[in-house]
Image (cartoon, rainbow, N blue to C red):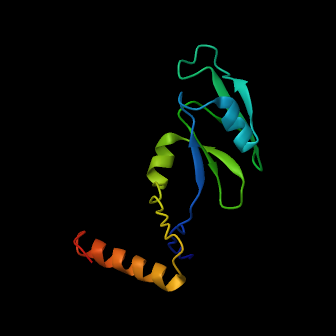
């Protein structure tokens, strides 16, 4: 009798574009190496265009509302919105600190002060 083991997906950061009315299908197709094509259902009300992407599994279609993901090895594939929302979350915004002509020690001290201030809820360092 086999005893399957449980595994958890490693946290990875991906790039993705949501195929909505706010994005240009041509720009998305250019980004992912796909091609814009008419939706195969003539009476489809979700959008007239799809993006076809060549994958190792064959040609896959991203429909309006889907996400196009650039995976960890640089391959592109479509993902339905409900699956994307259940699987991914936005990464935190990165903050870049410009310290003028400061040296590395001064930059380190400024970062340490900021961390201490944040831990205390924003009061003075």
Q: Residue at x 54, y 69 (%)?
A: 10
Q: Quadrant of the N terminus?
A: bottom right
In front of the other: 67 or 55? 67
> Residue 86, how many percent across, how many down?
44, 51
Q: Quadrant of residue 116?
A: bottom left
Is residue 30 visible to the viewer in this orientation of the structure? yes
Judged left or right of residue 80, residue 122 is: left
Q: Quadrant of the C terminus?
A: bottom left
Q: Residue at x 65, y 56 (%)?
A: 71
Q: Residue at x 68, y 22 (%)?
A: 40
Q: Quadrant of residue 73?
A: bottom right
| Above-or-below relation of 27 to 119 | above
> Residue 89, how many percent across, how many down?
45, 55
> Residue 43, how many percent across, how many down?
59, 13
| Above-or-below relation of 117 to 69 | below
In front of the other: 120 or 35? 120
């Amino acid at each position: 009798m086999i005893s399957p083991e449980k595994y958890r997906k490693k946290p990875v950061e991906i790039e993705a574009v949501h195929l909505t009315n706010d994005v240009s299908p041509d720009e998305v197709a250019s980004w992912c190496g796909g091609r814009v094509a008419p939706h195969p259902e003539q009476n489809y009300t979700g959008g007239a265009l799809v993006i076809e992407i060549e994958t190792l599994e064959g040609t896959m279609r991203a429909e309006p509302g889907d996400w196009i993901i650039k995976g960890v090895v640089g391959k592109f594939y479509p993902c339905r919105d409900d699956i994307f929302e259940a699987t991914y979350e936005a990464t935190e915004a990165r903050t870049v600190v410009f310290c003028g002509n400061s040296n590395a020690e001064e930059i380190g001290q400024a970062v340490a002060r900021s961390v201490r201030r944040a831990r205390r809820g924003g009061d003075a360092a």
